[in-house]
Image (cartoon, rainbow, N blue to C red):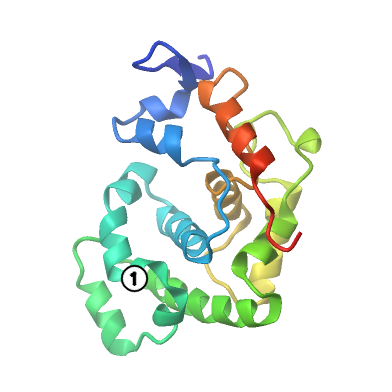
């Protein structure tokens, strides 16, 4: 099986984006494009945690509900959640009602607040783990990397939950720390251009 499919415009794209209609726009406009906004980074890491054991289609379909339920992933607000908020979330049909994952987001919001006090921003901390692209495996042939293992270990040491190396690698793919679009994908060059022009935080 090849690594690409032909999109509606006749151009090649990563095969995975043909699995569901809503994947195409996400693939073409979001996946792999670098971001530095702390709330968006927290959202992506939280949603990758929710996705563990489920399909990304399930998470993407519920993403707006997640944003509403978690105040657009403003971790300062989430850090103040109480048992009443937890009870509200566990009854919310619009999201994934997994107690461990919901509690992890609340816990991680508190850890994110601590990290920002130390590092200045979540982005400044995460972008330190950007790997040398020349040393990475071929796009989409790996589920972890030395950097995802290191970032996972560092976050766990700081008390974060649901941040295993596979989850962290998927997060790195999604938020543009690496460009994992396959070589023949028409979007790969767009992402590379965005990464080239991207101002790394703290540099």
Image-based side of 145 in relation to 61, left or right:
right
State the image quarter where residue 20 is shown.
Answer: top left
Q: Nearer the viewer, residue 18 or 161?
A: 18
- When the figure is inspected, residue 138 is found, relative to residue 83, above or below; the finding is above
Q: Nearer the viewer, residue 83 or 188?
A: 188
Whether residue 96 appears in this view of the structure is no
- When the figure is inspected, residue 4 is found, relative to residue 114, above or below; the finding is above
Image-based side of 48 in relation to 95, left or right:
right
Q: Where is the C terminus found, in terms of image quarters?
A: bottom right
Q: Secondary structure at mark 1?
A: loop
- When the figure is inspected, residue 188 is found, relative to residue 123, above or below; the finding is above
Residue drawn where x is 40% and y is 87% of the image: 80
Residue drawn where x is 37% and y is 30% of the image: 24
Tell me if mark 1 has few (under 14), some (14-19) or many (20+) residues whose alpha carbon lies within 10 angstroms of its own. Answer: many
Residue 195, percent from left and from top: 64, 41
Residue 13, percent from left and from top: 48, 21
Q: Which residue is mark 1?
A: 70
Residue 196, percent from left and from top: 68, 39
- When the figure is inspected, residue 102 is found, relative to residue 16, above or below; the finding is below
State the image quarter where residue 25 is shown.
Answer: top left
């Amino acid at each position: 099986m090849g690594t690409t499919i032909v999109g509606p415009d006749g151009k090649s794209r990563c095969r995975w984006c043909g699995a569901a209609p809503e994947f195409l726009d996400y693939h073409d406009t979001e996946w792999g494009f670098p971001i530095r906004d702390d709330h968006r980074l927290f959202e992506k890491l939280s949603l990758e945690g929710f996705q563990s054991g489920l399909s990304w289609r399930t998470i993407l379909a519920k993403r707006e509900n997640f944003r509403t339920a978690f105040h657009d992933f403003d971790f300062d607000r989430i850090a103040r959640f109480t048992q009443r908020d937890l009870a509200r979330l566990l009854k919310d049909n619009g999201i994934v009602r997994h107690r461990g994952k919901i509690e992890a987001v609340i816990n991680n919001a508190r850890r994110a607040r601590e990290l920002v006090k130390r590092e200045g921003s979540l982005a400044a901390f995460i972008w330190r783990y950007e790997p040398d692209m020349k040393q990475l495996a071929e796009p989409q042939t790996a589920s972890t990397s030395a950097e995802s293992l290191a970032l996972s270990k560092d976050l766990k040491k700081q008390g974060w939950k649901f941040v295993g190396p596979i989850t962290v690698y998927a997060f790195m793919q999604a938020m543009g720390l690496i460009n994992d679009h396959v070589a023949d994908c028409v979007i790969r060059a767009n992402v590379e251009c965005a990464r080239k022009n991207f101002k790394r935080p703290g540099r």
